[in-house]
Structures are given as C-alpha cells and as structure tokens.
Amino acid sequence: MSNPGYYYLKGKESSDINKMLTREQVETAKQNRSHIAIEIFDSLGDEYWKKLAESAKVEDNQEVQRVYAKGFLPFAGALEGNLFTLNPLEIISIWSKKRELFEMRPYPGYQLATILSCAYGAQSLESKKWKNLFTRLFSSSEGRDSFRDLCKKDAASSKIFFNRLEEIRLSLSDIAHYREGTRESFVDLSRKAYLEKDQLSLKKLDEIEARIKEYDSDGFLGAISENWGNGMIRAPY
C-alpha cells in the first residue's frame, strides 16, 4: 500500500496552495516501489511487459493502442478491489516504474492513466455497474459510448466518480508546480507575453523554461502530465 510518509496536500487549502515538493522527495519517489500498482507490475513479470512492448512495435497508432489496451487487461483486473491513493509522489513512483518497462513511450502511459483513474474514481461506489470499468468499457472501441450511458443513468454516482478524479488533478498540479516553479497558467502567460506584449509575463516564461531545464531535463515529469492529459477519463457531457 501507499507510503504514509509521502507529502500530499489534501483539498488544497489556501494556506497550503504555495507549498512545493522538494527535489529530495521527487528523487526518492523515483526509487520508491511500495505502491500497489508497482507490485502488480512486478507480479506479472518483466518478461510479460517486455513481450507486450515488442508486440506493440507496429506503425499503425490505432493498432498500438489496441495492443496495449489488451495487454493491460491483467493489470486492470489485478488492481480492481484494491484501495490505494494517488498523491503526487506516488504518481511519480508509478511512472518511474512505467519508464523502466516502456522507456518514454506514451501509449502505455495513456492506458495506465485510464486504468488508474477508472479504479480510483470508482473506489467508493458500491454499485457493480462502476466496477471493472476499464475491462468492461475502455478495452474496446465502444467503451466511450457505454460510459456515457452509464453516467446518464447513474448521475449521482457519476458526480462522486468525477469528484474523486479532481483529487488526481490536484496531484498532477503539484507535479507541474514543482516542474515549472509556479501555478500560473502557461497558456495565459504565453497569451499575455506574445499577444499583449507583456514583459513581466515574458520574463516569467523564461523563468519557467530555465526551471524545467534544471528540474526536468529528461522530460520525465512533463511526460507524466502528457500521459494523464490524454489518458484520464473525462466527463462525457
């Protein structure tokens, strides 16, 4: 289970909003292997994941996604029913293990983010309709439509589900805060800097670029944000 010593801002109270992960915490997290998701990776064996990565070396991107979706089914099944958290350092730990197995390939990261968001969002829901979401819904091309129907028919549970996913977004925000050194929107700063010719915003962009070069020189943390941005479940309405 999760390491209780991990830093985590639950709920982002105003007094905590500017707190930042430290480099020591992040580097330690990259080596930590205590999360249940990592235990499941290990239980399936490195050879299983090596064969999956090899089988996904095809040119058609849709086929790559299909191969990974099928290949992650045992992982999704093993994760189901486990209680776990996804604080920022735990996400870093999980993605560090993912990098060991798949280097910086994005598609396994997309599948991993989908599975984790499905399982985490449904943890507190009693209805069986919300269990095994990835296996039942998102391992096939028809999954999104099925999920939309489920959300419409059970709006109350849907609200709880997506409220829980906001906790993951807070964790991702903490990772971005550490990587960029600010919680200001990069898009907003870019608009002000280049469209409105705001010099302060341009200076902040330069500071962000310098920070990223120092704290995320290999692009690992940026890849986490990209993987979740493409893989996390979104409300279908």
Image (cartoon, rainbow, N blue to C red):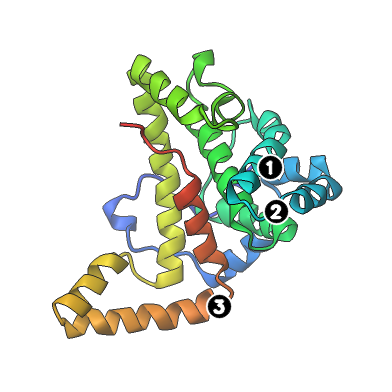
Between label 2 and label 1, give the one nearer the viewer.
Answer: 2
In three-dimensional space, the C-alpha distance between marks 2 and 1, rounded to whole angstroms, equals: 10 Å
State the residue at coordinates (82%, 48%): 51
State the residue at coordinates (52%, 27%): 123
Q: Position of residue 148 (x, y in %)?
A: 39, 25
Query: If you read the primary sequence from the N terminus, does the residue marked by circle 2 or circle 3 appear first?
Result: 2
Disc 1 designates what residue?
67
Query: If you read the primary sequence from the N terminus, does the residue marked by circle 2 or circle 1 appear first?
Result: 2
Q: Mark 1 is on which residue type? A: Val
Q: Position of residue 189 (x, y in %)?
A: 24, 72
Look at the picture and state if 160 lies above or below 98: above
Q: Mark 2 is on which residue type? A: Val
Query: If you read the primary sequence from the N terminus, does the residue marked by circle 1 or circle 3 appear first?
Result: 1
Look at the numbered discs 2 and 3 and tell me whether their residues touch, using CB distance below 8 Å.
Answer: no
The residue carrying pointer 2 sits among few (fewer than 14), some (14 to 19) or many (20 or more) residues within 10 Å by Cα, namely few
Disc 2 designates what residue?
58
Look at the numbered discs 1 and 3 and tell me whether their residues touch, using CB distance below 8 Å.
Answer: no
**SS for callout 3:** loop
Q: Mark 3 is on which residue type? A: Ser
State the residue at coordinates (34%, 19%): 152
Disc sitting over residue 217 in the figure: 3
Look at the numbered discs 2 and 1 and tell me whether their residues touch, using CB distance below 8 Å.
Answer: yes
Residue placed most toward the observer, 95 or 12? 95
